[in-house]
Amino acid sequence: MEKIINVLRKRYKNFEIWREQKDMISLEENDDGIRKESHSKVEVAVRVFKDGIIGFGYISGEENIDDLIENVELSLKYSERDEYNTLPDPDYIDGTCFGKEKDVNVELLYKKMVEMKECLKEKQYLKSIERLSGNYEQRKISLFNSSRGVQEQIIQKYALGVVVVVKKEGDEKIEWDFEIDNDLENMDPKVIANKSYNRAVNLLNSSPTYTGEYTILFEPRASCDFLEVFAQSFIGENVYKKRSLLTDSINFSEKLTIYDNPMVQKGSISYFFDGEGFQGGNKKLVDRGKVDTILYDSFYGKKMGKKSTGNSIRSKISSPPRNWFSTVIIDKGDDDINTFIKGKRVIRVISLIGMHLVNTITGDFSVGFEGYLMEDGNYVKALSGVSIAGNLKDLYKNIVAVGNDLEIYGQAGSPSILVEGIVVSGI
């Protein structure tokens, strides 16, 4: 990295360098046993700020510096000028390092995979385990800012996942579950196995239900799907470009509190500092139904007269960072869901189908789902050939109960939420 810094200093005044070394280990079971793969790569990205123009360059490895400079120069030539395209100014001390490197425990990772398999082998309706996997990833990140110096962070993640097929009375169903955590010791493979199996069994021998307005209980995984779409309305860029659902007068259910937190250890994206070097603390987006915070990177923060909230995300090193959320979480409640559904006809939604069709600007949605019908809290039958329709603003206004069963999937986390007045299209 020192060589790249010296080359850039001779050419440019204001620049930043993002260097990331990624080490990965993956274990996957197939018919021949456990297959292990290891990968390691270094990626370098550069942003140069010159007279309101940003030049971006990327290389895999650290040797082809001439190619890196050529990419930057080409980018400077064709990029649009904007007065807010200035070098970010994160407040950190040169040489700061976050996180510690730990030895990867491949043996324990394998042991937990075996525990998942043994747990499933005992299940009555299990037909097959389609996929069984364990993964480890370590990211060593160095960020050099020409005005601030270097800061570093080390992020480690483990993942366990399973895909199962169950069969009963001539019908088959495939389901899955996974978990991510900074600490392998925290992960319970039996919980992952049981969730995937129980979901699949509850969805067997499905049929449609009648069209109408229902109270819907969204399980955590389904709620997370909606939350990832809804969270886009809190992005500064979307607010600036009027692509957000939020308005000055909008309020949601008092049951709803949402956070953006880059240090959730079970989230797929974790960081001590964001893609521009700003520390990303825990932000409350919605506080008991009222909008509290919008998420900014440096650029859109300047445009809107705000400070960066540490929400510049580098999901791909080969692309410039963008204004985005880290891990968004609906705060768990203390409601006893069983009390709220007692004596009612309720549909429990396990997963959603066709989320790419949700309109992120208007909030309108019409998506398929998998789930089952309940009466008085008891299972009645699995549902298929049905969909739900509505608007995200109404969905989050009409929450009547929030459970305490918080689960995290990727970049979103949610407990079960109970919502009234959802239109179901069936027969």
Image (cartoon, helix red, strand yellow):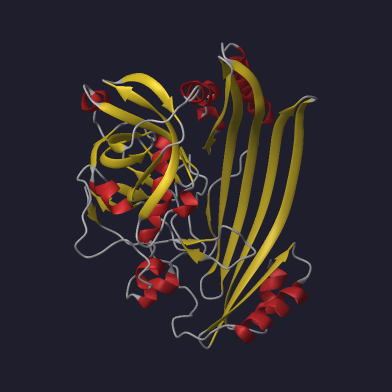
Q: Where 102 falls versus 262 (above or below)?
A: above
Q: Where 233 falls versus 211 (above or below)?
A: below
Q: Is residue 231 left or right of residue 154?
A: left
In the rendered image, which quarter is residue 234 located in? bottom left
**Closer to the camera, 398 or 44?**
398
**Closer to the camera, 82 or 245?**
245
In the rendered image, the quadrant that contains the N terminus is bottom right
Which x, y percent locates residue 375?
29, 21
**Closer to the camera, 270 or 76?**
76
Q: Is residue 34 left or right of residue 337?
A: right
In this orientation, does residue 24 appear?
Answer: yes
Residue furthest to the right in view is 32
Which x, y percent locates residue 255?
22, 42
Q: Where 41 falls versus 165 (above or below)?
A: below
Q: Where 388 falls versus 98 (above or below)?
A: above
Q: Is residue 47 left or right of residue 296?
A: right
Which x, y percent locates residue 263?
44, 47
Residue at the image point whose x is 49% and y is 47% from the top: 354
**Closer to the camera, 169 or 254?**
169
In this orientation, does residue 407 appear?
Answer: no
In the rendered image, the quadrant that contains the C terminus is top left
Q: Is residue 242 left or right of residue 153?
A: left
Residue at the image point whose x is 25% and y is 57% from the top: 291
Which x, y percent locates residue 414?
37, 39
Residue furthest to the bottom in view is 51
Residue at the image point whose x is 45% and y is 60% from the top: 324
Q: How many discs appear?
A: 0
Residue furthest to the front in view is 427
